[in-house]
Every structure is written in structure tokens, then in C-alpha cells.
Amino acid sequence: MNNTGVVDNKGYKDKANSLKMIENLTGFIVLLLSIYFAIRLGHPGLTLKLIVGMGFGYALTRGFMGFAGSVNRAYNTGSTKLIQVLMWLFLGTAVASTAFLYNPGSAIPAINPINPGLILGGLTFGFGMTFAMCCASGVLTDLVTGLPRAVIVLLFFGMGVFLGYPVQSTAPWITDSLFTTPTGAAMLEMTGGKFGGGVYLPDLFKWDGLNGYLGAIISTALLAGIVVYLSKRYEGKQKEAGTYTGVPSEKEQTRKYSKGESSVYEIFFVRPWTMRTGAIVIGGLFTLLMKTTKMGWGASTPYGVWFGKLLMVFGVSAERLAAYTLKPVEVFTKPFLSDFANVQNLGIVIGTLVCLLLAGTFTSTFKSELKITPKDVLLFAVGGLLMGFGTRLSNGCNVGALYTPIANFSLSGWIFLVALIAGGVFGNKMARFIK
């Protein structure tokens, strides 16, 4: 306000522009320092994991994508656009992964067992992500976009994973598969009977002339198509009933910009990506992981280790942690940055931070979720705990039990998807009742 008592809009705009410029400059500094740090990690695998993690974080944030959002958006707004995009992401990644899975021994397919644990874990995880408003990878991006919520969710997520470790290792209804094909049996033998089994779709179509992969791709396309068709039908019914509200971020992503409306900088760093663009980038990064590490994407298992390390701060010995979790002592004593999964998860956080800084939206986004109520705290805690424990029952989370298995032609991923959606719908009903 100037000395005449009139609001000085120009002053506010100048301050806002200055803040954005500072954020933009900080974003480039963080990006360059992160790349330098990645190179200095001293191991090509760790360098790759950090850079890929940054790519995941950037794409998830700029594309407004998240696995939890697919169910929550559909239930609360009627929009199924994210679900549809995820189906094409799964299919496209599966096709690309064929190049690395086709020759035996060239990659390790992520085949999860099919059992009651898979279904119960999917239901539990889906229910929990409704209360937590995020998923296993989303909680990492939320450390930047919604810090108080993310810290609570991550703490209890880690607790859930930690508590579930011994059950995951010993319960036959989690470790054994009700249905197993030859590749699943080979995985079981490779792990000395500790983990494996499950249905590998190419094993069902060995007669197709392409070692089963033609049939597997067609089956994956059919299943993805069914989900897309049902999603469109659901969205159409919501529109007919007048309950469709849409998602503001989706409207912004599809907005048509007039010529000259955006600067070159805004085009490259500010304007939101379409979900399709985000999916293409994520699929490309996943394919890069398959090519270089011969494995897919996982996120949740380290959270339990992080919780264990927190307990060590309060005097619990690594030996006691190892005895409870049935894991080697070294899991809890080795340096944080020596673990590939830890480094990749750290990269997701950095990628999210870089995205918001370069767009000049970090401050506004960070401030928007600072206030939470005691009821919110309880819901976030319950959601995190259920998600964490659910990942141990299903042997993975939204990436470890859903995306990666589907992209690797494991039937378990599709079963987990159905359970996840069912749990998410029930969780949303419960959340609406509570609120």
C-alpha cells in the first residue's frame, strides 16, 4: 500500500517476480550441484540411480501424476484421465521392456507371487493411500510440496514396513504363489525357495512365434484396454449425473496457449506438462533402468530400514533390529548413500524441488499445506501405517507391486490393481464419512 492508502499492485508484482527469479536461479544451482554430487558418488550405478530418481521426481511433479491420484480423482471428481494415461504408460513400458526380457538372462523379470497376501496388501494399500493422500513414490514428492503431511505419512509408512518385515519373510500366504509358470518357478529356485513363483504371461504363449511375448503384449493391451473402457464409462456416467467436477490441474494441462503468450523460459520450465508427456518421460526412465540395471522400479522397502535407523537413534541396536526383521545387520549399519534404492528415492525428492524452483512455484506450493489439523494428523498416520504394512503383504507398493510387475508381464500386477482400486474406493467412502 502506498502513502495515499491505495494498494500498490505494481509493488506486489515486482516482489513476486523477484521471488520467482530467485527461485529460478536457485533451481539451476540445485540442479548443477545435484549432478556434480551424483558424479562424485563414485559408482556408476549410484550416479545413474540419483539422476533417474531426479527424472522421476521432475516428471511426476510437472505432469501432476501420481498413482494414488488415479483412484482419488476418479472417486472425488469423476475424472478418470489419469487412470487412462497410466494404462497406456503400463502398456508402452511393457512393450519397451520386451527388448530386454526377450533373451533369457538379459534381465530379471519382476514376477510377484499370486496369493491372499497380494490381494489383502492391495486392499490395505489402496485404503491407506486415500487417508494419506499419496502413495509410496508420492510421499517423496510431497516432502517438497506438502512437508507436514509427508513427514507424518513417511514416519508411519516406515513403521508399517518395519512391522511387516518378519511377516513378509515367514508367512506362506505371502511368500508362496497359488499359481506358478516355469519362469516363476525359476525365480523361486534362484532365491533358494525364499521368494518367487507367480504367473509370467509369456510362459502362456510360447507357441506364438515370439517366445510368448507377442501373446503377452496382446494380453497386456487387452487388459489395459478394458480398464480404459470401464474408466471412460464411469466418467461418462458421472457427467450424465452432474457429479463430474473435473480436476483444476488437468484443465491447466490441456489449456491451449495462444502464440506469444508464453516466453521461451516458460515453455521449457514453467508450463505444466500434459500427463501424456509425463508418462512418456517416466516410461523412458523406467526403460533405461531395465537396460542398465536389469531390474525395475521399487520405492517402499527402504522406508522400513529408515524407521529402523531412527530406532537406533533412540538406543535400539542393529542386532536387535536384524533379529526382528530377519534381515542382515549390515542393512541397518551401512551408509545411507551406499544403497541404490536410497539414492534413487533421494533423487525423486531433489527432482521435485528442482521442478518447483525452476517454475517459480516452490514458495507458494510449500506454504499451501503447512497448516494441518489434529484430525489430519490422525488420518495421515493411519494412512501411512496401512500403506506401509500393505506393501509387505503384497511384496511391493504402487511401483513395486503394480507398475513394475505389469511392465514385466507379471499377472500379479493386474490382480494388485483391482485390489488397489477396491481398497481406494472403500477408503474414500470412509474418509468422506469421517470428514
Image: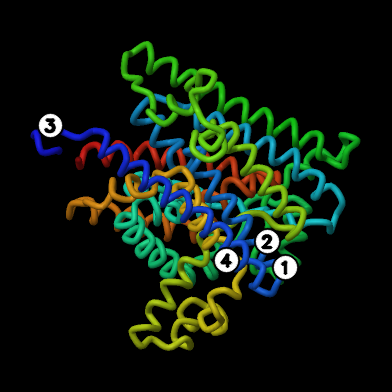
Reply above or below: 10 against 160. above
Which of 269 and 313 lies nearest the eye of the viewer? Answer: 269
Q: Taking 303 as reference, is 298 above or below it?
A: above
Q: Is residue 216 left or right of residue 262?
A: right
**SS for dot 1:** helix
Residue at screen point 64% across, 64% down: 195
What residue type is disc 3 on? Val
Q: Position of residue 417 (x, y in %)?
A: 53, 41
On the image, the x and y values in percent for residue 166 come to 48, 72
Amino acid, disc 2: Leu
Closer to the camera: disc 1 or disc 3? Answer: 3
SS at badge 3: loop
Name the residue that disc number 3 marks: 6
Q: Name the residue under label 2.
A: 48
- Name the residue located 51 percent from the left edge and 32 percent from the top edge: 83
At label 3, counting other C-alpha atoms closer than 10 Å, the crowd grade (few under 14, some 14-19, many 20 or more) is few
Mark 1 / mark 3, whichever is N-terminal:
3
Q: Where is residue 408 in the image (x, y as percent from the top left)?
A: 70, 47
Whole-angstrom CA distance, mark 1 to mark 2, is: 6 Å
Q: Name the residue under label 1.
A: 44
| Label 2 secondary element | helix
Q: What residue type is labelled 1?
A: Pro
Question: Within 10 Å of the Cα at label 4, are there few (<14), some (14-19), or many (20+) other Cα atoms?
Answer: many
Q: Residue at x 70, y 54 (%)?
A: 289
Whole-number angstrom distance, CA of label 4 to CA of label 3: 51 Å
